[in-house]
Image: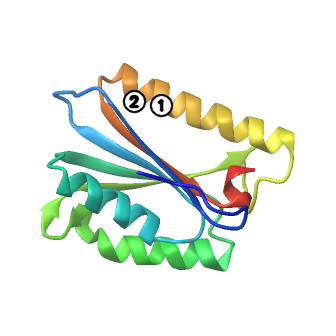
């Protein structure tokens, strides 16, 4: 899935990596729109992918849009189920120097987010997880 429009519009990119007996994880970045996550999950499920978990990398819920999107996702994935099927839902807040980020505003914060994402991907691959990556977001998230 790929979509690139003007600078204000969200950017979407989905990439699958290997298969794994330990369960497949969808790792999705989210700015302030819950449907980015549900569109990615719905697309993967429609392709027959058997997901065990969805991890959402997100900015601080201090931002009302992020807070609202996380509330919507919590309702969609209530009880670690999605559309009647078991599917673990996990939030991964973006932080720099131990504090949640409302936006990525400089190179230092962008570097901290890059290290967080890199370390998370490395840990999941070390666990033998298959990953589906959906990188989406506008300028506040992509830096």
Q: Nearer the viewer, residue 135 or 24?
A: 135
Tell me the distance, in whole angstroms, between the alpha carbons under discs 1 and 2.
Answer: 5 Å
Q: Residue at x 43, y 71 (%)?
A: 35
Helix, strand or loop status at disc 1: helix
Residue 93 % position (x, y): 58, 53
Q: Is residue 104 left or right of residue 9?
A: right
| Residue indicated by mark 2 | 124
Rendered residue at 21%/36% (across/down): 23
Name the foreground residue: 90 vs 31: 31
Q: Residue at x 29, y 48 (%)?
A: 53
Residue 121: numbered disc: 1
The percent coordinates of residue 120 (x first, y second) are 50, 33
Please indicate, yes or no, whether residue 97 appears anywhere in the rendered image: no
Q: How is the image coloured?
A: rainbow
Dividing the picture into quarters, in which one does residue 17 lie? Answer: top left
Q: Quadrant of residue 45?
A: bottom left
Whether residue 107 sits left or right of residue 23 in the image: it is right
**Residue furthest toward the top?**
126
SS class, disc 2: helix
Residue 114 placement, left or right of 68: right
Mark 2 neighbour class, 10 Å CA radius: few under 14, some 14 to 19, many 20 or more: some
Q: Position of residue 124 (x, y in %)?
A: 39, 30
Q: Residue furthest front?
A: 5
Return the residue nearer the eye: 111 or 134.
134
Residue at (18% x, 46% y) in the render: 49
Residue 32 in view here = yes
Looking at the image, residue 11 lies above or below residue 115: below
**For the residue carrying disc 1, how many other residues have a C-alpha within 10 Å: few (<14), some (14-19), or many (20+)?**
some
Label 1 with label 2: CB-CB less than 8 Å: yes
The location of residue 52, given as percent across then percent down, is 22, 46
């Amino acid at each position: 899935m790929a979509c690139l429009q003007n600078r204000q519009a969200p950017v979407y990119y989905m990439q699958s990596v290997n298969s794994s007996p330990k369960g497949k994880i969808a790792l999705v970045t989210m700015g302030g729109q819950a449907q980015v996550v549900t569109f990615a999950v719905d697309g993967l499920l429609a392709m027959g992918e058997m997901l065990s978990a969805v991890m959402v990398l997100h900015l601080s819920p201090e931002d009302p849009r992020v807070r609202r999107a996380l509330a919507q996702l919590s309702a969609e994935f209530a009880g670690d189920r999605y559309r009647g099927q078991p599917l673990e839902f996990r939030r991964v807040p973006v932080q720099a120097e131990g504090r949640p980020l409302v936006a990525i505003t400089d190179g230092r914060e962008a570097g901290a987010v890059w290290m967080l994402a890199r370390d998370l991907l490395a840990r999941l691959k070390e666990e033998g997880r298959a990953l589906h990556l959906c990188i989406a977001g506008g300028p506040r998230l992509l830096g």
